Amino acid sequence: MSEEKKTRKHMTPPRPQNETMQLKPHERTHVKKLIAVVSGKGGVGKSSVTGLAAVWARRNGYQTAILDADITGPSIPRMFGLGYKDLVATEEGLHPANTVTGIKVMSMNLMMKNEDAPVIWRSPVITGALKQFWQEVIWGNVDYMFIDMPPGTGDVPLTVYQSLPIDGIIIVTTPQDLVSMIVKKALGMAKLMNVPILGLVENMSYVKCPCCGEEIHMFGNGRIDEIAAAEGIPVIAKLPIDASFTAACDSGQVEYVDAAVLDGLGQVLPDPDEDASL
């Protein structure tokens, strides 16, 4: 080896072992399993599924939390009847709000006196707030934390995948072929980021006739089964259009609805008592 090459080799610093971009949470935060709920586009009911998943987990005896990562379009607090007054700040630091049944929630709307006020921030500020929700909030002991992600494959999803120890994602879709196409983008991003895909939830799948109980597929029969089979992932649930569920979300009473429609979660969620990393 020439002297020049030796010098160049000597000047190149060794790559750190086990290099990671993951952020450490607050020292009093112990989350066993972190599950992101994602969609390729907006308007498919991702936040509703996140809220219902948290209700299901809490009813099944798990310590449950929701990190609302949709910084500019948060809707989780309204679903649970929470607001600015419910956020808890002590000398120790910032604690999440608690719902009626004890689900811990952190959202941008909990920090705003007027929930209708727009959050007009550029991406670096948005991702910075997201990181603070993870690093600076005292979450305590949590079995399952569900992250309500903003739609698409932009800065915030990228930050979540790179910075937080995600144990798996749930992809929410609706029956339209266009949305099914977008689902594949979310699947593609998860694969590129090496994030486990737990399964698919098809929202607004059908309407049940109040007279005969027949399932009416208003948007046609979706391709969710086809996509799931091709990707080798399960269909967790097909959720109906339900006016009573919508009313419960709008009135802050999502914890009172029947969460059994998501019983399929019991088959796909990782066991919180196995390989806990935090």
Image: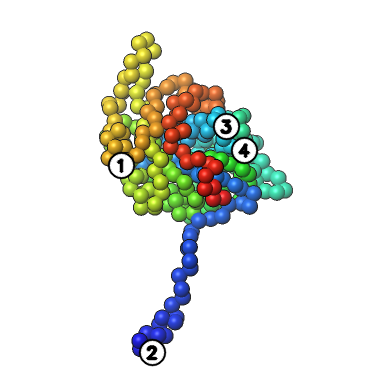
Is 28 situated left or right of 266 in this image? right
Whether pointer 3 and pointer 1 mark residues with C-beta atoms closer than 8 Å, the reply is: no
Residue designated by label 4: 97
Of 79 and 37, nearer the camera is 37
The Cα–Cα distance between marks 2 and 3, rounded to whole angstroms, is 66 Å
Q: Is residue 176 visible?
A: no
Marks 3 and 1, the one that precedes in the sequence: 3
The Cα–Cα distance between marks 2 and 1, rounded to whole angstroms, is 53 Å
In the rendering, which numbered label is found on residue 231?
Answer: 1
Quadrant of image for the N terminus:
bottom left
Kind of residue at disc 2: Glu
At 47% across and 50% down in the image, what residue appears? Answer: 160
Residue designated by label 2: 3
At 41% across and 81% down in the image, what residue appears? Answer: 9
Of 7 and 181, nearer the camera is 7
Residue designated by label 3: 61
At 39% across and 27% down in the image, what residue appears? Answer: 239
| Secondary element at image label 1 | helix
Is 181 situated left or right of 263 in this image? left
- Foreground: disc 2 or disc 3: 3
Marks 4 and 1, the one that precedes in the sequence: 4
Kind of residue at disc 4: Ala
Kind of residue at disc 3: Gly
Q: Residues within 10 Å of mark 1 (few under 14, many from 20)?
A: few
- Foreground: disc 4 or disc 3: 3
Marks 4 and 3, the one that precedes in the sequence: 3
Is 5 situated left or right of 136 in this image? left
Whether pointer 4 and pointer 3 mark residues with C-beta atoms closer than 8 Å, the reply is: no
Q: Residues within 10 Å of mark 2 (few under 14, many from 20)?
A: few
Q: Is residue 219 above or below residue 226?
A: above
